[in-house]
Amino acid sequence: QVQLVESGGGLVQAGGSLRLSCAASTRAFGNYALGWFRQAPGKEREFVAAIHWSGTTTYYADSVKGRFTISRDDAKNTVYLQMNSLKPEDTAVYHCAAVRGYSNYTVANGYDYWGQGTQVTVSS
């Protein structure tokens, strides 16, 4: 069982930046691919970004490409999501997710473990 705990959410003005963190409770962190998803009120959970277990490949939703960057620090068992040029439409609860090995990293059912989420609110 892997526990994921997100942090770093908050309220920011449009155009601002936030960095989300997700800490994982596993000694095999390097074997897991990590993803970020978000869910706004009344909407389905949507893919944001993912990083391969090797750290060599990243994936982004078109809506965040060029603004968000996903990275991982295996020594700290942590994955990050740097969010720049934030827009009001980025407002959502952001969840991190983990899956061991190969999977479809851009869909929610490709992951086995989920965090509780952290709220990001972008004001206009």
Image (cartoon, rainbow, N blue to C red):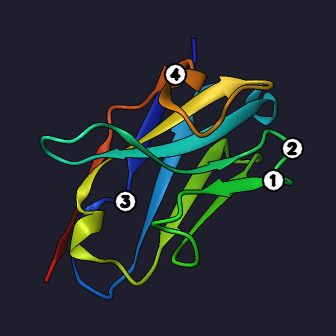
Label 1–label 2 contact, CB within 8 A? yes
Read off the residue under disc 4. 109
* Residue 73 located left or right of residue 91: right
Q: Determine whether 90 is above or below 96 in the image.
A: below
Q: Amino acid at mark 2?
A: Ser
Label 3 packing within 10 angstroms: few (<14), some (14-19), many (20+): some
* Residue 111 shows up from this direction: no
Residue 8 numbered mark, or none:
3
Instruction: Say whether disc 3 or disc 4 marks the residue closer to the N-terminus.
Output: 3
- Residue 115 x, y percent position in the rendering: 41, 31
* Residue 44 located left or right of residue 77: left
At a point 62% along the width and 47% down the height, the residue shown is 78
Q: Amino acid at mark 4?
A: Asn
* Residue 48 shows up from this direction: yes
Alpha carbon separation for disc pair 4 and 1: 20 Å
At a point 67% along the width and 54% down the height, the residue shown is 59
Q: Determine whether 104 is above or below 18 in the image.
A: above
Alpha carbon separation for disc pair 2 and 4: 20 Å
Read off the residue under disc 2. 54
Read off the residue under disc 1. 57
